[in-house]
Image (tube, rainbow, N blue to C red):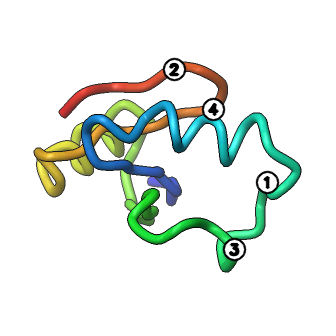
Amino acid sequence: MGKFKIAVVELGQEARWRKYWIDSDSKGNADAAPGGLGRTEVIEAATVTEAVEAVQLMHPDCTVMLAGEEHHNA
């Protein structure tokens, strides 16, 4: 089992999340993130797929954001 840090964002906010975390110079500065732009969950699971599934169950009103442009709707 490993620990996975999974980012989640409310449905409809994916473009804002990408713009802030991927396109801006503020990458990695969680304290500067605009309010409500997302949060992370640390999940213990055997695979990243299992971690994503667990977070989707915890936050059905959110999208799981993975590295790059990929995301998974809950």
Going by the image, does 29 lie left or right of 25?
left
Image point (39%, 65%), residue name: 36
Q: Earlier in the sequence, mark 1 or mark 2?
A: 1
Image point (66%, 47%), residue name: 20
Give percent across and percent down for residue 17: 53, 43
How packed mark 4 is, by other alpha carbons closer than 10 Å (few <14, some 14-19, many 20 or more), is: few
Kind of residue at badge 2: Glu
Q: Are marks 3 and 2 in contact (CB under 8 Å)?
A: no
Going by the image, does 23 lie left or right of 1?
right
Mark 2 to mark 4: distance in Å? 6 Å
Q: Secondary structure at mark 4?
A: loop
Kind of residue at badge 4: Ala
Mark 3 to mark 2: distance in Å? 23 Å
Q: Quadrant of the C terminus?
A: top left
Q: Which residue has dot 1 on it?
A: 27
Q: Secondary structure at mark 1?
A: loop
Q: Earlier in the sequence, mark 3 or mark 1?
A: 1
Image point (33%, 25%), residue name: 72
Kind of residue at badge 3: Ala
Mark 3 to mark 4: distance in Å? 19 Å
Mark identifier at residue 32: 3
Q: Secondary structure at mark 3?
A: helix
Q: Nearer the viewer, residue 55 or 28?
A: 28
Q: Nearer the viewer, residue 27 or 16?
A: 16
Q: Earlier in the sequence, mark 4 or mark 1?
A: 1
Q: Which residue has dot 4 on it?
A: 67
Q: Which residue has dot 2 on it?
A: 70
Q: Are marks 2 and 4 in contact (CB under 8 Å)?
A: yes
